[in-house]
Image (spheres, grey):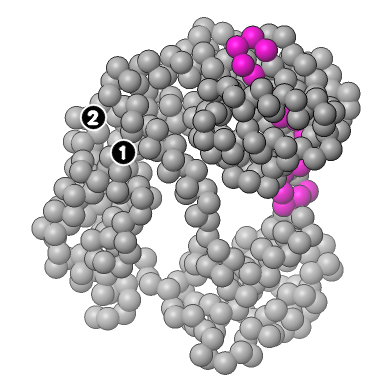
Amino acid sequence: MESLWVSKIERLRSLVEEWVLQPKIAVDTEFIRVETFYPVPALVQLAIADQAWLIDPLAVKRPEVLARVFYSQDCLKVMHACYEDLEVIERLTQLSCRNVFDTQLGAAYMGMGPQIGYQRLVQEMLGVRVDKEESRSDWLQRPLSSAQIHYALQDVAYLLPIHRMMQEQLQAKGHWERICEDHQLLLSEREDLVSDEERYTQVANAWKLKPRNLHVLRALCVWREQEARRRDLPRTFLIRNNSLLPLAQQLPLQRSALSLVEGMTPRILRREGDALLEVIKHAAAEPVSMFPPRLPLPWPREIQVIHGLMRVLIDQVAEGLQLPSDLVVRKRHFDELIECYLGIRSPSPRWLGWRHEVIYTPMMVLLAGHDQEIRTMHQARHGSV
């Protein structure tokens, strides 16, 4: 595959005019994310047919001109395991990417497993061996080594042929509209991220905390998120994950007490100790009216009976569609479906598309047949019985 190095903004602008007219283009990125909150873009690879371009975001002034390509609804961007690549692209262009096809999701639809790697995918579909030895090399060094360049080109060289094969096979099986819809879900669910104010609800065992402690936990999570972004540092550089709950439980107000909290390393204590004590002191002293309600208890073990019935239904639907069960509905969506039945939440877009008729509607019927058991368990979670 012939490749061109792009390091001048004038050349990039010219190429963007060509790329935006393409029906589809292969995309990959290389980045470093070791001591930063945001990924540091190191390389963007694009390919069409036998031509590839390696764009150097360290040299190109205003790489955001790439937004025309990535935001275009008319140009399909073919990637593999695209989640982190999408974040890199957003970092470069300041816009979300549109019209994406993820070959990892395509492989899942074809029964090749939910998280197949690029190397294995290329081997199984094209019979080509891809070298992955440079994946963790220093992509910020300049010049890149010949081995790095070869690796970067391989990562886009096979995406378009694989996409073409997947499209033919998935259309033949009647799955093409389904996978196109799931790619829209992939993009929309990325944008629907948990807010800073709600991150405390995702801390393990947060349901054990009383409202005052829960309020402190929320304040700590908000502080960590905002400071990590502002200082471009990994969250765990500020507070380790395993420190969040004990900090909110113990409410240390002095350094001596803070130093005894799990995960409070000397470095964190030295750099962030005063700020942590201030966050805890301020949040703990705020009026009760500001405290969040207690989080619901976990579902009792008896919910596993309901989950088992849900799994049977999902397996039957998946078998009829000739799709993997976990692709139809993942286990993490079980409680969401139950909450939809109870009216606690509205159906998300996931349940309003192709899954509505084959999964959502029959699932509501199934749950209605166990209404009393479900409502009793729900009341127990919220301390109503």
Quick one: 11 or 291, which is closer to the camera? Answer: 11
- The residue that appears at 51% across and 62% down in the rendered structure is 202
Q: Residues within 10 Å of mark 2 (few under 14, many from 20)?
A: some
Residue at image position (56%, 70%) is 197
Q: Which amino acid type corresponds to the residue marked 1 in the rendered image?
A: Val
State which quarter of the image contains the C terminus: bottom left
* Looking at the image, residue 328 lies above or below residue 113: below
* Residue drawn at 35 percent across, 21 percent down: 170
Which residue was labeled with disc 1? 328
Q: Quadrant of the N terminus?
A: top right
Q: Which residue is mark 2?
A: 321
Q: Residue 226, position in %: x, y?
A: 69, 65
Left or right of 178 in this view: 268: right
Disc 1 on helix, strand or loop? helix
Q: How many marks?
A: 2
Q: Is residue 48 magenta?
A: yes
Q: Earlier in the sequence, mark 1 or mark 2?
A: 2
Dot 2 amino acid type: Leu
- The picture places residue 140, in percent across and down from the top left corner, at 83, 33
Q: Residue at x 11, y 58 (%)?
A: 369
